[in-house]
Amino acid sequence: MRILIVEDEAMVARRLERQVREIERDAEIDLAASLGAARERLQRPVDLLFLDLNLGGRDGFELLEEAAASRFQTVIVSAHHDQALRAFEYGVTDFLAKPWSEERLRLALERVLGRETSARGRTRTLVVRRGRELQSVPVEQIVFIRGADDYSEIHLADGTTHLHEKTLLALEALLPASFARVHRSYIANLEHTRTLRTAPGGRVELPFGNETVVPVGRIYRDTVRERLGLPVGGLGGSRNPQVQSQ
């Protein structure tokens, strides 16, 4: 794992580096003490960013907005507890409050690796790149997300599509509980549909507006049925009479 620690207090940065190495022994760790140094380092591949929100008087949120649109995950490290909610709205993976314990740091790394998901549900927007501009997309406007190699295609209710640099797995860990993995290549916002339907060949689909459908993988079907209030193991008996067969 390639890790960048952005922290202007050298003792804090070294302590964090030492503890991360004790937990993730194969990690490649770099340090940056300013926003300028961080931006320069981020020109090279990074998997995880540890970011302080106060860097020599500069606001770390300047970098956080750019980080939110990038492939890597971000953990905020800050003594400003009141900024946690705002940070989660940018789609960070975790907020590590100073002073932290090694156990709490270990939990943050577990969340980054997708092994622990209790931080899920606080992201309210996803930041995407549109050319050289950054644009915030409210998550309630997202209908579904499709994995596209190392990227993700975000499909909105108005029919527009955005490409996000984070993988489907990384986004899944950030999105609210209304989103569910329905296929190995799809995450769907179940607030935008209340039905399942069968297609030719016995395939199962989630129908959305304007004739859009998303496939439901076999191993996800029972979970999706339960989330929609349908009997597990069948399509009948929905709370919504629009369960369909085709």
Image (cartoon, helix red, strand yellow):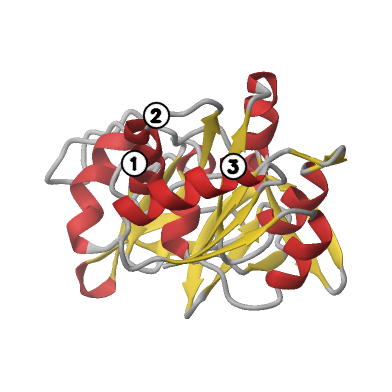
Disc 3 marks which residue? 11
- Counting from the top left corner in percent of width and height, residue 91 is at 61, 45
- Counting from the top left corner in percent of width and height, residue 90 is at 68, 42
Q: Looking at the image, which is closer to me, 65 or 5? A: 5
Residue type of the residue flagged with mark 3: Met
Q: Residue at x 39, y 69 (%)?
A: 185
- Where residue 200 sits, quadrant-wise, is bottom left
Residue 164 relative to residue 106: left or right: right
Quick one: SS at disc 3? helix
Disc 2 marks which residue? 101
Disc 1 marks which residue? 106
Separation (CA) of disc 3 from disc 1: 19 Å
Q: Residue at x 22, y 33 (%)?
A: 237
Residue type of the residue flagged with mark 1: Arg
Q: For the C terminus, give its image quadrant.
A: bottom left
> Which residue sits furthest top?
82
Q: Is residue 196 above or below residue 184?
A: above
